[in-house]
Amino acid sequence: MAKMTLEELRKLRDSRKSEIDRRDINSKDSQIIVGMGTCGIAAGAKTVLDTFIEELNDKQITNVAVTQSGCMGLCYVEPTIEVIVPGMPPVIYGKVDAEVAKRIVHEHIMQKKMVSDHIFDRPSIDIIKDGGK
Amino acid sequence: MAFRNYILVCGGTACESSKSDDIYNALIAECKAQGVADEVQIVKTGCFGFCEQGPIVKILPEDSFYVQVKPEDVPELIAEHIIKGREVERLLYVKEKKKHAKVEDIEFYQKQFRIVLRNCGFIDPENIEEYIARDGYIALEKVLFEMTPDDVINELRTAGLRGRGGAGFPTWMKWNFTRQASGDLKYIVVNADEGDPGAYMDRSVLEGDPHSVLEAMVIAGRTVGSNQGFIYIRAEYPLAIRRLEIAMKQAREMGLLGKNILGSGFDFDIEIRLGAGAFVCGEETALLASIEGRRGMPVPRPPFPAVKGLWGMPTVINNVETWANIPVIIAKGGTWFNKIGTQDSPGTKVFALTGKIRNSGLVEVPMGITLREIIYDIGGGIAHGKEFKAVQTGGPSGGVITIENLDTPIDFGSLTKLGSMMGSGGMIVMDEDDCIVDVTKFYLNFTVDESCGKCSPCRIGGRSLANLLEKITKGNGELADLDQMLEIGQAMKKASLCALGQTAPNPIISSLHYFRDEYLAHIVDKKCPAGKCKSLISYYILPDKCIGCTACARKCPTGAITGERREVHVIDQAACIKCGVCYETCKFGAIEVR
């Protein structure tokens, strides 16, 4: 690395900041939990996990922690994920693939709108517009 | 591809000595083997502070806190936690049957407030980019391009930062003296000669976050008009030295040290000087003499180093912890800093909590917290269910604080009032098994060993005090000895050249004040209540409890214990060397100390 000017130092800091902020759990208020039981992994949970991470990174969203858990018990609609965002009920989505994962980031995380057609189990169906699946 | 998990492995000296290096390498190998190497970032950080439970591995973003991890545990950690998302429960920090998964749940961390240790255990100290990403060198930018030297001094003045090395002198004043002093050359010096028994605050900062100190030095250089800094560190801190060298090299390569820093036209560079481990070299004038290549002995002050220091030039010399506060104060402002802690002593203090405490380790707390909170809430109380007796603050220069004063809010002033002192931050907890006379003797022997011998009050006075304590613990003490010790102590306090001699009698003065009874027991009753002073105790076998298992007789190094199998044994008092092995060996509580 060559000697830096002030501008270069600032640029370097900005470029590394989001990466290091992702490590800082105190700055996170939202959570995406991906069910990574054997059933989930077999149904493609790994791709979903990767998609979430890339998509959040792409959109420079740093307040969301992506964590894994074991099987959530809804093995018939794997891969399942849970999204917890302040001010919204915790939601469990099922049959999530890369496309749905992107929609969840755009709609649920960014626009605070639930992706109704993939909601399973939670929240109870009377809260969801058009009843969920 | 961004990382989805971060594994932080403690790379402090304590964890490294329990194989954290092997764990780090095993993690890298295992992540490769299980095909997740490019999804997981493994970072070797500085000390997490929770040394009692090391080696520590923290996995983010789940914030799982794994303790006492062994290299063999690594495959399971990766397979379960990383691949399947299931925490490995058996390795999580456990206290009273409740599993503590998350760091924020652990009481050890709840009352802490981290400024100095902000990056310790979070960043990789060998990677300057991680420091920069955590707002590193922002303060330097401000100082180089936005603030005048007056602004910097005023900011420190508003902050009210006081030197963390022990004496608590206002930092802004020191800097201002040097700034106003005339001299062709001026120097910046870091005092990293940490010598108190049981203290390792400075080492941990240098190991975990070396750039915070480097950045502060450049800031000071710019403020007082100096282009050269020295870090005086003991040679027995090899890891800290290595990380400092790496940090300096990276800073130079990036133009944050050396000529024309960040294009500002300001030059500053730093050299490391290794100390040979003499306690007196922590005294600033002795330290400067040692840097100059002379024998490390103090000279009378004034003139103070701020005006006439290294090679006779104005020199700013501060302790490591003081330096680590500077970049945060400049970046966040003096007003922000001043709100933390107490009016007398703003900010935080790092303590190395050791001795008979359940969670020994490194803690950073806001000033004004009570000793009770540190010892019971953070430290988890006394180990092995024993009774608290006293806590020694300020190391061999400080004194004991007893249970009546545990609720005193800690700051520079309050500890001095109690007859102890803040010192550099060593905090040694004693329980009912510690003999206060014996502990005091340990400290006195330490200062006698470490006295440079230049001035007679310290050289002769210290030796006399140690001799009197030896006499008392041998059972030959007389009541007049107590007054004589106080008299010698007062003379040393008044007449010694430097703080080493001036504070050496403190442990005696303070322990005599709080534990006079225990001294009297040694002198009048010829007994050591804690059972530590060997000349004053004897071991006996209780006939009704001894079952004749022969365990003690087999372990006794002098063959002083005799007796047939299944019959009561007897200790030959003439042959007994009072090593206590029988006492530790007996499973039936049949050995008694009298």
Image (spheres, rainbow, N blue to C red):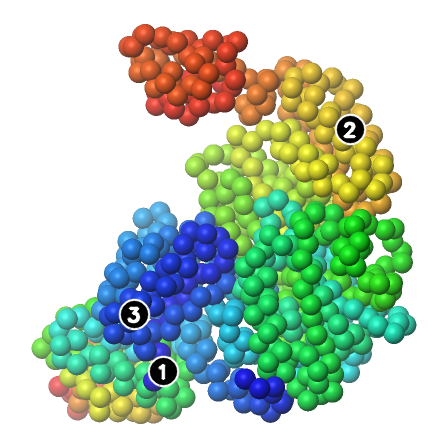
Please indicate whether residue B75 sits to the left or right of residue B107 in the image. left
The answer to whether B182 is drawn above or below residue B593 in the figure is below
For disc 3, the marked residue is: B31
Q: Amino acid at mark 3?
A: Cys
Disc 1, SS: loop
Pointer 3 with pointer 1, Cβ within 8 A? no
Circle 2 is placed at which residue position? B464
Residue type marked 2? Ser
Residue B468 shown left or right of residue A8 in the figure: right
Residue B462 in sight here: yes
Point 17% across, 89% down: residue: A117
State how far apart marks 3 and 2 are (Cα): 61 Å
Image coords of residue B20 (percent x, y): 41, 57
Task: Measuring from the top left, give residue B229's x and y in whole percent.
Answer: 73, 69
**Three-letter code for the amino acid on which mark 1 is drawn:** Ala
Label 3: few (<14), some or many (≥20) within 10 Å? Answer: many
Mark 3 or mark 1, whichever is nearer to me = 3
- Residue at the image position 38 percent from the left and 24 percent from the top: B585
| Mark 1 Cα-neighbour bin, 10 Å: few <14, some 14–19, many ≥20 | some
